[in-house]
Amino acid sequence: MQAKTKENDKRSRILDAAVRVFAERGFFGATVAEIARAAGVADGTIYLYFKSKDDVLLRLFDEKMTELLAEAKAAAARDPALAQVLIVELRQSAQFLKADGRQKLAAYLDVFGQIVRDGQEAGELDPAVSPQTVKRAIFGALDELALGWLMSGRRTSLKKTAAELSGWLVRGLANK
């Protein structure tokens, strides 16, 4: 059991290092050697856990999104009434739609838009894609998933549907 924990720790260190290296150098500017150095492992060790640098990015996205979803699901499970109010009832309030509170929602959406702009500036994303459209599309998809989950009496799997959505967003709908 101790060996398994040590292996998981090493894999986690690699993913954590990848976050830092990708954030600092960008995905295309980062190298496997830099990730290995930041994780304190030999270059070849990366390939014991991941097929390629692309695989590191995809696994990182998948695992971190799973963690975020688990946190959101746990919060909703602790207070499903709050989830319903935030997802269903708040949108029916004309005052919310005009109020300063809407600015917080706009700021949240702007994070998605900024990610797209950063990717465009780095040459990683199509410059013809509208950050405004992408941020609204992502929010709309997430909102619809959450609404469907609530309306089903929380019987559907948020984790499964969010993983499917994130896969489409990262890889597109093409049959690869």
Image (cartoon, rainbow, N blue to C red):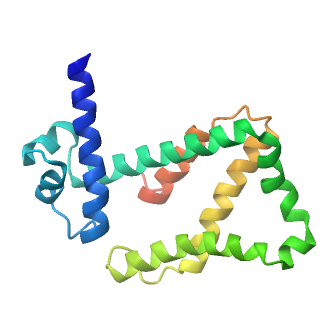
Q: Would you say 63 lies left or right of 55 here? A: right
112 vs 131: above or below: above
Left/right placement of residue 169 relative to residue 14 reads right
- Residue shown at the point (73%, 42%) measured from the top left: 149
Q: Could you say which is closer to the camera, residue 151 or residue 77? A: 77
Pick whichever, 114 or 133, lies toward us: 114
Task: Single out the residue that lies furthest toward the top.
Answer: 1
* Residue 26 figure quarter: bottom left
Name the side, left or right, on which 98 lies relative to 144: right
- Residue drawn at point x = 72 percent, y = 36 percent: 78
The residue at the point 25 percent across, 44 percent down is 13
Residue 148 at what x, y percent from top left? 75, 45
Q: Is residue 11 above or below residue 39?
A: above
**Residue at 69% in and 72% down:** 104
Please state, as top left, top right, bottom left or bottom right, where the N terminus lies in the image.
top left
Res. 176 in view: no
Is 141 drawn above or below residue 70 in the view shown? below
117 vs 157: above or below: below
- Estimate the x, y position of residue 16 in percent, counting from the top left: 30, 50
**Front one among 157 and 25:** 25
Camera-nearest residue between 160 and 65: 65
Q: Quadrant of the rendered structure where residue 95 is?
A: bottom right
Total label count?
Answer: 0
Residue 74's x, y, as percent?
A: 64, 38
Does the rendering let one see residue 27?
yes
Q: On the picture, is 44 further left or further right than 74?
A: left
